[in-house]
Amino acid sequence: MFLTVDLASKFSAAILRDSSGQVLWQGDSMGKSSLEWVETLAKLVAGIAPRHELHILVEDVPYGISNQAMVKPVLRLQGMLIHALGNAEFYFINPSSWQRDYPGVARSPKGMTKAEGLKARVAAAKTEAQALNYHAPDLVAKWQKENPELKPLKKYTAHLEKAMTDYVDAFLMNDWLQRHVHEYKTLSGVQPPII
């Protein structure tokens, strides 16, 4: 089995698939505290047997981020996850390490602004996931069903649209992990939590 976590301090998404590629579970941290999210993942991992057949990959903080206000919260979350998973074997992966396997996901096309480039990379990731028959949960439609009295304005739905991209990233990481299952522990950009 393969568990991948697109980990971030504000919102995280995770996907568990079996060796045939079927999604067995997917979830996110929306509405949960960091502790509740980490406990959700820990309970999921604890319920999987045999443990030696479980491969876990967590997205690491990208290289080159120097803004401490951005880095410190996710590093604290990583520490909580390391503690909660106990003796489960898992690895962190630098985002660019898995993104390079998917055209247009790791780098923006030349000549684009930062915002345009990000939009292009998100679209490329969604296209790659759809080509693999994965569609993120429609969180906007779910919100609309739960809030029929409100118009679906960006102030209500922008964070949901962003969350859907995190599901896509967790899925593509999972696909990457399955394709590199025999070598991922030794690849560049992949590290165990305790060095």
Image (cartoon, grey):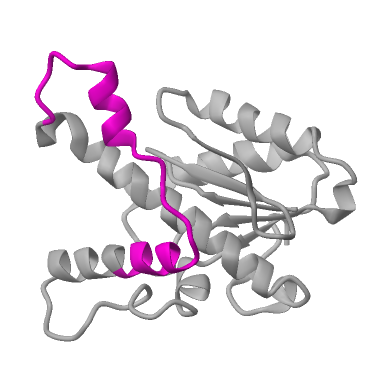
| Residue segment shown in magenta | 124-152
Q: Is residue 151 above or below residue 84?
A: above
Residue drawn at (80%, 33%), measured in percent from left and top? 47
Residue 139 appears left or right of 72: left
Query: Which percent across, then down, holds residue 18?
Result: 72, 53
Q: How many marks?
A: 0
Give the farthest residue toward the top: 149
Magenta-drawn stretch contains 80 = no
Above or below 54: residue 97: below
The percent coordinates of residue 130 (x first, y second) are: 41, 62
Quadrant in the rendering for residue 86: top right
Left or right relative to 10: residue 95: right
Q: Nearer the viewer, residue 65 or 85?
A: 85
The residue positioned 37% from the left and 38% from the top of the image is 10
**Looking at the rendering, which quadrant does residue 104 occupy?**
bottom left
Residue 182, percent from left and from top: 78, 75
Image location of residue 151, percent across then percent down: 9, 24
Q: Is residue 138 above or below residue 133?
A: above
Q: Nearer the viewer, residue 82 or 5?
A: 5
| The one of 137 and 12 positioned closer to us in this rendering | 137
As for residue 151 lying within the magenta part, the answer is yes
Quadrant, the C terminus: bottom right
> What residue appears at the point 37 percent right and 66 percent down from the top-left corner?
125
Q: Is residue 96 left or right of residue 65?
A: right
